[in-house]
Amino acid sequence: EKGTYPHYMLKETDEQPLVLRKIIQKYQNEDGKLVIDQDITDAIDQSDRIYIVACGTSYHAGLVGKQFIEQWAKTPVEVHVASEFSYNMPLLSEKPLFIFISQSGETADSRAVLVQIKELGHKALTITNVPGSTLSREADYTLLLHAGPEIAVASTKAYTAQLAVLAITAAVTAEVKGHELDLDLVKELGIAANAMEALCDQKEEMEYIAREYLSTTRNAFFIGRAVDYYVGLEGALKLKEISYIQAEGFAGGELKHGTIALIEQGTPVIALATQEHVNLSIRGNVKEVAARGANPCIISAKGLDQEDDRFVLPEVHEALSPLASVIPLQLIAYYAALHRGCDVDKPRNLAKSVTVE
Ligand code: M6R
């Protein structure tokens, strides 16, 4: 039930810190150590390449998950959009392992790939919010998101739950493979949950940003580099699906190869700056668009922030920054849609789970 909330999307956005804390608890043993089924870590350990297959928001979570798995567990990862993979299968490695990410566990495009790769005799893990869903039943292994029912068409808490479960999977596998992590994941996830809570308490500010940047615009850009680019893709998807503003997530450095031609006087460009190694370069990209008249809105990590930044995120470990940085983007999309009088929970032309190919 929505309770006192005007929309499920707002309620589900607010639930994110709670869900994260629940995930930490569900994936801990009595000694407080993070654990996942040994069959799963063995399957990752024995594989020479992981193929993450998903759609929409779950695909965007997969892009961030690739970073965790490659950096911590040191297994190469490819991330694919399910509807492309099934008709244009890449050349597979010798020992592939498939990870399907799906909130509903019912997405037909993802299922089509699962059926194909099972026929080829490959193993699959499904990361889903719905126990007993089709993708869970048909895969060899399942990891649950424990996010509770997600009703709004726009996915929010499932995305951050997917990030958390992917991070835990990567960290536990890293340990099995003997790679040392440079962070205490339980502690850092706890800090991220607190940051999420602080962000959910700043709704007024997000409403203000939505009004300031998005109330009359036809289009908007979300730019970032590295993991910020992936979060930008998710921010753009949120905005377009519920507010119908044409939005594009873009890699900062790629703008000058064509897309910068779309920048006009006042075009909103929301830029994420949470990664130290690309902080200067994304700021260079912001200058490039500002010089062409764009209206930049920089959302930055504490410590990397500069004078004109519009919003500074509470402190989170750099690797886990998407858990925090996505929340302003979800809320900005929500308020932009609300200001335009859109049906936030049930946007036009969309269904919660897409069970046709
Ligand atoms: O249930 P799934 O995670 O498989 O759904 C995938 C997409 O259909 C879904 O994430 C969609 O993109 C959302 N409406 C985005 O908010």
Image (cartoon, grey):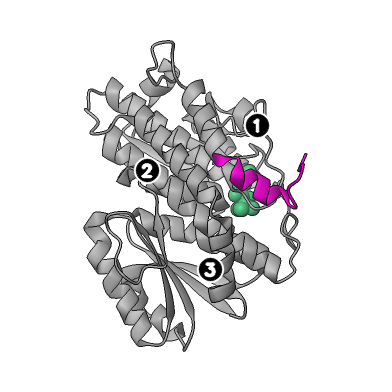
Earlier residue among tags 1 and 3: 1
Residue type, mark 3 in image: Ile
Neighbour tally class for label 1: few under 14, some 14-19, many 20 plus, Cα within 10 Å = many
Foreground residue among 155 and 140: 155
Q: Which residues are magenta?
A: 1-16
- Residue to which mark 2 is pinned: 320
> Which element is circle 2 on?
helix
Which residue corresponds to the image point at 30% horizontal and 67% vertical from the top-left? 282
Neighbour tally class for label 2: few under 14, some 14-19, many 20 plus, Cα within 10 Å = many
118 falls in the magenta region: no
Cα distance in 3D space between marks 2 and 1: 24 Å
**Image height check: is 347 above or below 86?**
below
Measured from the top left, where is residue 135 in percent x and y?
A: 61, 33
Which residue corresponds to the image point at 66% horizontal and 62% vertical from the top-left? 242
Left or right, 171 with reference to 58: left
Measured from the top left, where is residue 103 in percent x and y?
A: 61, 40
Can residue 223 be seen here? The reply is: yes
Circle count = 3
- Residue to which mark 3 is pinned: 209
Q: Evaluate if marks 1 and 3 touch, with contact meaning CB atoms under 8 Å apart.
A: no
Earlier residue among tags 2 and 1: 1
Which residue corresponds to the image point at 58% horizontal and 56% vertical from the top-left? 203
Q: Evaluate if marks 3 and 2 touch, with contact meaning CB atoms under 8 Å apart.
A: no
Earlier residue among tags 3 and 2: 3
**Image height check: is 155 above or below 102?**
below
Instruction: Give the quarter of the image for residue 231.
Output: bottom left
Which residue corresponds to the image point at 33% horizontal and 34% vertical from the top-left? 94
Label 2 lies in ligand 1 vicinity (Cβ under 8 Å):
no
Foreground residue among 59 and 25: 25
- Residue to which mark 1 is pinned: 130
